[in-house]
Image (cartoon, rainbow, N blue to C red):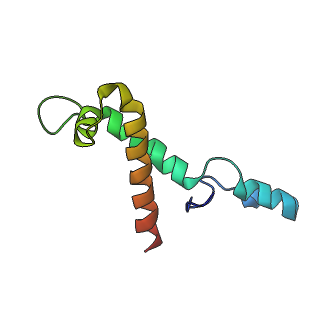
Amino acid sequence: MSKETGGAAFPDPGRAQSAQHRKDLTETGMTLRDYFAAQALTGLINEPSEGRGGSTAGDICAANNKLQDNVQGVLAHAAYSIADAMLAERAK
């Protein structure tokens, strides 16, 4: 994957019994980027709108000139954008 993923979200090298096992425990599963995106998505879905009584999801779609029927794609893109920003801030 070309994007910086932040590595494994929940690495557990302490219980490794061999070098290969250590690699498997630290490089597989959900990436930190995926974890951050999942957490951001939860917030985006549950956060009420700051504006006109709608939802954050609706506001994001409106800001991106997208139709409500594409809300899943817009929210997924927004969640990964937030995750990328979190990884960039973490790297500072």
- Name the one closer to the observer, 79 or 48: 79
Name the spot of residue 59 as percent of width and height, x first. Answer: 22, 37
Examine the rendered structure and indicate whether residue 33 appears above or below residue 47: below
Q: How many marks?
A: 0
- The quarter holding residue 48 reads top left
- Relative to residue 33, is residue 22 drawn left or right? right
- Name the one closer to the observer, 76 or 88: 76
* Viewer can see residue 9: yes
Name the spot of residue 52 as percent of width and height, x first. Answer: 11, 32
Q: Quadrant of the N terminus?
A: bottom right
Residue shown at 63% from the left, 56% from the top: 8
Looking at this rendering, what residue extends furthest in the right direction?
18
Name the spot of residue 50 as percent of width and height, x first. Answer: 16, 39
Residue shown at 19% from the left, 29% from the top: 54
- Relative to residue 4, is residue 70 drawn left or right? left
Residue shown at 44% from the left, 44% from the top: 39
Looking at this rendering, what residue extends furthest in the top direction?
69
* Viewer can see residue 16: no
- Name the one closer to the observer, 2 or 41: 2
Q: Quadrant of the C terminus?
A: bottom left
- The quarter holding residue 56 reads top left
- Relative to residue 64, is residue 28 drawn left or right? right
Examine the rendered structure and indicate whether residue 67 appears above or below residue 7: above
Examine the rendered structure and indicate whether residue 36 appears above or below residue 92: above
- The quarter holding residue 76 reads top left
Looking at this rendering, what residue extends furthest in the left direction?
52
Name the spot of residue 45 as percent of width and height, x first. Answer: 34, 33
